[in-house]
Image (cartoon, rainbow, N blue to C red):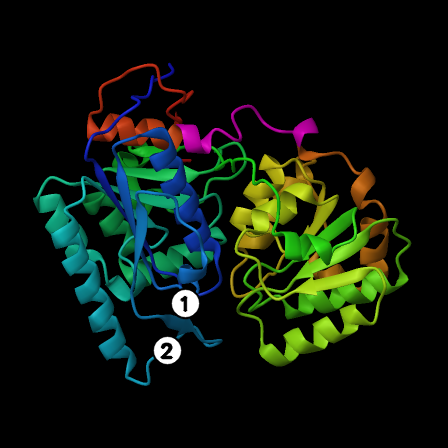
Amino acid sequence: MLTPIPRRLDDARVLIYSHDTFGLGHLRRCRAIAHALVGRFKGISVLILSGSPVIGSFEFRARVDFVRIPGVIKLKDGSYTSLGLHIDLDQTMAMRAAIIRQTAEVFRPDLFLVDKEPLGLEGEVGGTLELLRARGVRTVLGLRDVLDDPETLRREWARKAAAPAVRELYDEIWIYGREAFYHPLRGLESDLGDAVARKTVFTGYLKRPPAGAADAADESRMRRPYILVSPGGGKDGEEMVELTLQALAGARLEAAAALVLGPFMDEAKRTHFKRRCRAAPNLSALDYHPRIESLIENAAGLVTMGGYNTFCEILSFDRPAVLLPRAEPRTEQLIRARRAAQLGLVSMLEPRDSRAANLQPLLENLTAQPRPSANLQPGMLDGMDAVCARVASMLGGEHGDGDGDGDGDRGDGR
């Protein structure tokens, strides 16, 4: 049954936590949700807690703001270190936890939405969750469609004591995907129990609104039509860019190729790739673009790694895409890419087949392959409407003639 959404939630406040140790995915997802909420509800305010070092380069709508907490970065061995401060990690984590708690105490949210990590990075939001629940604040854990393979996730959540937190500290769990596509908590049923299954909502994917025109200076550097090549934040995308450049050198394409290398790519690698693009007539490269949605919307096709946000944009803007997923340190992208290719939504190249000769035919066929809309599952892009409906329901707004169209599907714990 569809739930009407109120036009207004007067003076409602939503606090969103995003730990942001790697890449742009968490921040971009939280920002998209915040913008959808203030666009739907005239009285709501949203504050984002983020450790992203580039959050200040993003544009935010009215009634959305952010608090930057000290950054940390994940090392190759899985440990963390302070990003911008030359101090011990313990000191950085203590500051982060204190800022998070103090912000929550002063902001006094009506709803606290935690992205991905049930207790936050190294448990830093556990105390804040307990404080807010004691005050009657509604708490939600938001999860992307795929987290990792079930066995790896089970070990990780056991180490972090995540399952008790999910059972005891959250009113609802929102999964930003469809159960028919993938269940991110598969394999954890015995740890989570039936109560978690009952409070789990599959929202659908988070559809992005029309992006509009790109920056004129960037547009002038791109020859249309163009294939957009994007490794996301860029930190772990160097091999993907190298493979794509090798394949482009031998591919027969009518379209040009535009690369957006990402803000976290190694500076020497970025300089190297830009130099190669300048030497080729049909290639161009940008360091970074804070409104990459506009470039995706205007592209003839995409070559990307297959992170959650890019996948949402592929579906939202109905762009043909080739995914080159990474398999380390998580198998998340690989699981998503395989399932999406199985459903005919994208093409993909398996990591074991990562050779230019195998990628070339996929690039040459990219603009001719079926668009995602040809094979979309019912309700697959209803995520933003479902999130807004859940917020309205949890915050007790008066129901009116809102423009949402659903409140998501309850999971069955499978």
Q: Position of residue 17 (x, y in %)?
A: 30, 53
In magenta, the rendered stretch is: 373-385
Sequence-earlier tag: 1 or 2: 1
Image marks 1 and 2: residues in contact by CB distance under 8 Å: yes
Q: Position of residue 268 (x, y in %)?
A: 63, 81
Above-or-below relation of 287 to 16: below
Q: Residue at x 40, y 63 (%)?
A: 52
Answer left or right for 202 relative to 347: left
Which quarter shows the N terminus? top left
Q: Residue at x 24, y 63 (%)?
A: 124
Element under label 1? loop
Above-or-below relation of 1 to 104: above
Above-or-below relation of 230 to 73: above
Element under label 2? loop
Q: Nearer the viewer, residue 359 or 404?
A: 404
Above-or-below relation of 235 to 272: above
Answer left or right for 315 relative to 164: right
Q: Residue at x 79, y 45 (%)?
A: 366
Q: Position of residue 355 (x, y in %)?
A: 79, 64
Q: Visible in this render: residue 328?
A: yes
Marks 1 and 2, how far apart at CA: 8 Å
Q: Can you name the residue that lies furthest to the left here?
A: 134
Please count the marks in the image: 2
Q: Nearer the viewer, residue 306 or 83?
A: 83
Q: Is residue 384 part of the magenta span, yes or no?
A: yes
Dominant SS of magenta comes to loop
Amino acid found under the numbered disc labelled 1: Pro
Residue at the spot of label 1: 53
Residue 84's mark? 2
Amino acid found under the numbered disc labelled 2: Gly
